[in-house]
Amino acid sequence: MTETLFTGISQLVTPASGPQRGAAMRELTVIENAALLVRDGLIAWVGAEKEAPSTPETHDLGGVAVVPGLVDPHTHAVWAGNRLADFEARVAGVPYETILAAGGGIRSSIAATAAASIEQLVTLARPRLVALRHSGATTIEVKSGYGMDFEAEVRMLRAVQVLSHEFDLLPTLLIHVPPTENREDYVRGVCDTLIPEVAAESLATAVDVFCEAEAFSVEETWRIFAAAQAHGLKVKLHADQFHAIGGTELACWMGALSVDHLEASGPAQIAALAASETVATILPGVTLHLGLPAAPGRALIDAGAAVAVGTDLNPGSSPLFSVQMALALSVRLNGLTPAEALTACTVNAAAALGLSDRGSLSAGMRADFLALHDPDWRELPYTLGANPVRDVFVKGVK
Ligand SMILES: [Zn+2]
């Protein structure tokens, strides 16, 4: 048994365990002059330092704020190639359709990723995951989806598997871009071949679909979800990014872990999420990078939904390598309060991945926590462009 008492905590700030919905997202516990006892990687005790149990080993954090480790519930951190020319063209006013027609856009990421080996994908993704961890992410979801052909999709997931030795990663199979021809064969192959293979080899914990007017239909999403659930995989959805075509309602009805994006969600989608156990995951990096409307974070919380925030780290629509910055942007762009943003990036983001063992600093939870540079935790939602996170502890180890 290893036991360490962390002291020198100016403020220990945490939501309660379990996903928090609506007004409860604002209810944080703040303990001044706190201590935290970690036993074998789990939190054994939390309270005022003067009431702490005595232990042989103590670690003085030097009088700074401590919050739970952040969870990034939505990334596409594995890709090859880059979209720098696309970015330059887009900000000069070139329409996306023209960029696509010239061989750029998502199809250039697909071509480069499909041509890369597992080793190359690992080498490219590692520094992105390091950046996310330095920004406070102790658990990170990573999707496939740039593979198109099944072999390349599996290669992306194997790259995530390799990187899982260095980071706490949740792999998701993403059915992202419909083929330009033989679409029916593709969907059937996803259901009958790809999902069974991924499930049999435990290469993903969930299946995600891009449900959109230009991507997969609600009916196709339903078939893919049914196949995923039949093979014991959880489901989650990219929906309402540009048009609300019914994906959110389907996902809530089928018990999806989360519906992500939601920029185009209206009252019906907000009500469906608020009435379900499905987490509403919003992605402010996309709003910033593409200059598109923001997801209705404020309205979702006011309706009683459980909202999470992620980076959506990807080369095309969100080159955001900081989960702390995603948290800070959700306050500016989506109308979350600082307290709600912390809950969104901790227990609620964990719930969006089906995890209930982390995200809150309470007894029995994983000892994943951050020591900030500052005694006041509000530097975390406030700071833009510098890193307020000093130390990242995973299972009590820096
Ligand atoms: Zn995404």
Image (tube, rainbow, N blue to C red):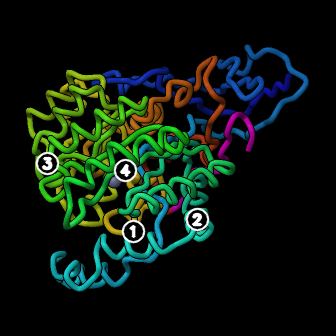
- Amino acid tagged 2: Ile
- Magenta highlight on residue 60: no
**Residue 30 picture location, percent across and down:** 52, 25
Determine the CA span between mark 1 and mark 4. Answer: 16 Å
- Magenta highlight on residue 397: yes
**Residue 102 picture location, percent across and down:** 23, 86
Quadrant of the image occupied by residue 50: top right
Between discs 1 and 3, the one toward the N terminus: 3
Question: Can you tell me whether the CB of the residue at mark 4 lies under 8 Å from the nearest atom of ligand 1?
Answer: yes
**Residue 48 picture location, percent across and down:** 67, 19
Assess whether mark 4 and mark 3 are in contact (beta carbons under 8 angstroms).
no
The magenta region covers 386-398
Disc 1 crowd rating (10 Å Cα; few below 14, some 14-19, many 20+) is many
Is label 3 or label 4 in front? 4
Determine the CA span between mark 2 and mark 3. Answer: 36 Å
Is label 2 or label 1 in front? 2
Q: Name the residue under label 2.
A: 118
94 vs 109: above or below: below
Between discs 4 and 2, the one toward the N terminus: 2
Between discs 3 and 4, the one toward the N terminus: 4
Q: Name the residue under label 1.
A: 315
Could you tell me what secondary structure mostly forms the magenta stretch? loop
Between discs 1 and 4, the one toward the N terminus: 4
Q: Mark 4 points at which residue?
A: 174
Q: Name the residue under label 3.
A: 264
User: Dot 4: what SS?
Assistant: strand
Count of picture labels: 4
Determine the CA span between mark 1 and mark 3. Answer: 22 Å
Q: Which residue is drawn at 46% across and 54% down?
A: 383
136 vs 115: above or below: above
Assess whether mark 2 and mark 4 are in contact (beta carbons under 8 angstroms).
no
Q: Residue at x 40, y 48 (%)?
A: 194
